Image: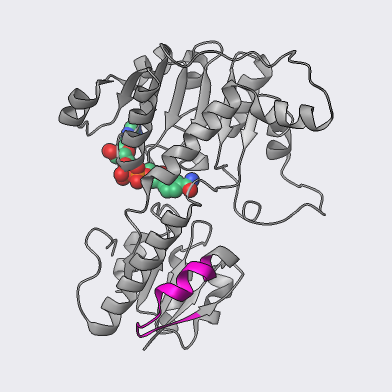
Amino acid sequence: MILAAVYDTKPYDREHLLPAADGHAVQWRFLEFRLTQATAATARGAQAVCAFVNDQLDRPCLEALAAEGIRLVALRCTGFNNLDVAAAKDLHLAVTRVAVYSPHAVAEHAVALLLALNRRIHRAYNRVRELNFSLHGLVGCDLHGRTAGIFGTGKIGRIMAQILRGFGMRVLAYDPFPNSSWAAATGVEYTDASSLVGLSDVVSLHVPLTPETHHLIRRETLDLMKPGAILINVSRGALIDTAALIEALKRGTLGGVGLDVYEEEEGIFFEDLSGQVLQDDELARLLTFPNVLITAHQAFLTREALADIAHTTVANLDALAQGTPFVEGSVLA
Ligand code: NAD
């Protein structure tokens, strides 16, 4: 039997992890706080920890987990920028992630943000509830015939590109590892990063957060964007320099910004802070722009994606119990 301590647990995690473990030699210890060096001792007695995007799996935390006898860190997400892979290898800690779970969930959320922003649905919704049926200020544009630029044509970026092709958009893409046969089959054109930004009416980010992609969108990039262009980020907050984004929004040249992730989301996103004073001034400023739409890291939140995540996690815990290989493609260390 493997006991896994599950950090930052939300009700929807329980709902999917509990049935996924039925009939398997896996037990859960659900914990609602995040995993950090300070909380790592709560893993005592478990053989594995199950962590999410805002757990802080830096070297001190991994050292503390190793000292508690943890053998596997099973991430229940795709991105692993919050985990020190080299430290895990040094400590002989196995690390797995869920490399593939409904990429449609994430791409469709990016499209939802884009459509809502372009057609001012977020503003219309509030207005109509106040019995204000005026259309003033709600003019959008046809996406058909416009150009979209996709950074990163991995699993999610490719689906995003295909959906936008379905709208009749021209789709440009940039990826250091282009997929030429896919592009030819779907009518997507690869180009360099600067041309993509300069030519696109919609720029959407689908790259992992790495030292190379940190602040991929910064002052110079924002200056290259077409007036009225819409920027969508459902990948990781630190792909965008938030201070530079706020400056660009204040200049009024951006058409809209849809964010499912935020540079400093840790400790804010996934929490109900509605009774508190928001201490993050940049987030507070972003929330004042009428053309900014923010969701709190929910792009993955479909029944299909949660079920995929639970099944891969249980399969990896089973593999730990039985000494068999982890799920293909999920091993980081
Ligand atoms: P993936 O690994 O399949 O694809 C990433 C692509 O980005 C690869 O093709 C890679 O070559 C490319 N890339 C790397 N550096 C680049 C750069 N500098 N410029 C352009 N392209 C670059 O990953 P995926 O499954 O498509 O996921 C993408 C990201 O989405 C994840 O890393 C994660 O951060 C994020 N994500 C967010 C949510 C959410 O709920 N908001 C859910 C899942 C994933």
276 on left or right of 156: right
User: Image quadrant for the C terminus?
Assistant: bottom left
In the figure, residue 314 lies in which quadrant?
bottom left
Image location (x, y in percent) of residue 184: 18, 23
89 on left or right of 200: left
Q: Residue at x 31, y 26 (%)?
A: 174
Image location (x, y in percent) of residue 201: 47, 15
Q: Is residue 122 visible?
A: yes
Residue segment shown in magenta? 13-28
Q: Within the displayed image, which quadrant is ligand 1 positioned in?
A: top left
Does the magenta run of residues contain 131?
Answer: no
Q: Considering depth in this image, is 324 or 240 the residue closer to the camera?
A: 324
Q: Is residue 209 visible?
A: no
Is residue 95 depicted above or below 275 in this figure? below
68 on left or right of 86: right
Q: How is the image coloured?
A: one colour
Q: Residue at x 48, y 43 (%)?
A: 236
Q: Residue furthest left?
A: 181
